[in-house]
Amino acid sequence: MVRHLPLSIVDEFQYIDAVNKAQRWDVVLTGDKTDQYARVLAACRGVGFDNPSTVIHQGVCAPYVPDSDTFIYGYTSADIHSPAYFFLTGWMSWPLKRFLHMELITAARLTGAVWLWLGMVALAWMLRRLGARWGVAVALPIAVASMPGFRLTNAYVTPDALNLLAGTLIIASMVLYVRGEWGIWPFIGISIVFSFVKFQNVFCVVAALVFLGWYVVTVLVRRHLTHHGDSDDAGGDGHLRLPRLWEGIALVVLPLAGSMIWMVIRSHTVAAVVDRPPLDPPANLDGLTVFSSMDDAYQLVFAGTGWSGVTSPWSIFPNVLVALLVAGTVATAMFDVKADVVERAFARSALLSCTAVGPMTILLFAIVFGASTGVLNRYVMVLIPVLVVPLCGRVTGRVAQGLLGVFAVGALYYAVHFTYIN
């Protein structure tokens, strides 16, 4: 974070400007322009990764950088996100600036490590709460956090730093509700908060609702078969929890409505008449593009800046981890293994959600934003806990836990030893 001077290509120029504004209690709105702090960083440090030939300097390194030399002619695109992350980062950065005399960009980057650590702790807690052995609960968060994807999201200034924490708490709150251990309000509140932080977190909210729907249908079918005597193994389902009608409506409507809060506010708070150039090409849907994106989540979820299964930095660990998680999910969903109704319904809905998120991303951006975009790893990383949960009941033996621990240590060593990006 300190050594890598250039700004990340994933909008860090826009985000550090928003954090700088937040420290002055200034909310970024549509039509705002970037301040000189971010412009000077982009001109002097450049934007890109370690290879100097790929670093782009936006203007001449000087105390003043004009609009014409900056990205999208001086306008900021950070208004697409709510101010929540930017204000949190600004507040968390202040002590580091004040007492350790760090530059804002370095202090803000360091907050990503805090969000990653909180995500790891939350993931370990969820795994233990859902019945995983201690070896799994310790090794799996370490393995997940060692993937190249988190190098991109948690070493720079970006709202994606909360991906692991957001996904874990959203999924945990829904599973614990279905198991009868929590009420509906934790899921509703957590979903609204994290969807407000970043709209793309709604992908995980939808995945949780897909699980709820699959679970409800499964229980109803099993009870119907039991009632008619057509099933030998559907008995004993009376303890399974089904949401009341009002609970089901609240669980669906409130989180999805809450995810739209910032979009509604943003549409009514345009700072000026905006002639900002579009950032993405207009939507141009075709069947092949949508169909070919069905496996994107599996290929990209841990891949960092890579694409189609090629990680950056190069590593075999992401593909091995994805294979392990998919194997656990498929085994729970389809094979004759020991799994209760909740576990099996979750695994089946997980496969559906992770397969459908690619096409849904393309369709969502086309319909909501009128833009054409591909599936990016930082969009689907919030679904990592969806793939992790089914492994709870699969890795139970000491040898299996030991092998998972060896894998986690190897992935961590690789991540620490190869600290470069490309």
Image (cartoon, rainbow, N blue to C red):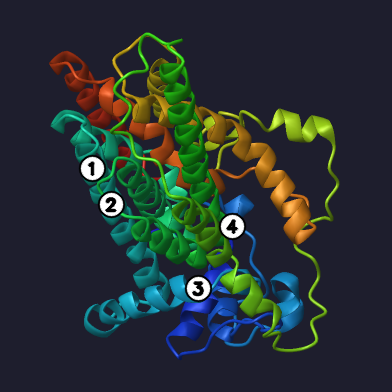
Q: Give the number of the disc on residue 9.
A: 4
Mark 2, residue position? 182
* Mark closer to the observer (4, 1): 1
Q: What residue lies at 14% left-to-right and 32% top-to-bottom?
A: 134
Which amino acid, by three-letter code, is at mark 1? Ala
Circle 1 sits in a helix, a strand or a loop, which is it? helix
Instruction: Give x and y (percent) for residue 73.
Output: 75, 76
Instruction: Give x and y (percent) for residue 267.
Output: 70, 78
Where 137 falls versus 68 (above or below)? above
Instruction: Give x and y (percent) for residue 421.
Output: 46, 45
Q: Give the number of the disc on residue 16.
A: 3
Which amino acid, by three-letter code, is at mark 4? Ile
Dot 2 crowding, Cα within 10 Å, few <14, some 14–19, many 20+: some
Quadrant location of the N terminus? bottom left
Instruction: Give x and y (percent) for residue 335.
Output: 41, 11
Q: What residue lies at 78% left-to-right and 34% top-to-bottom?
A: 289
Of marks 2 and 3, which one's residue comes earlier in the chain? 3
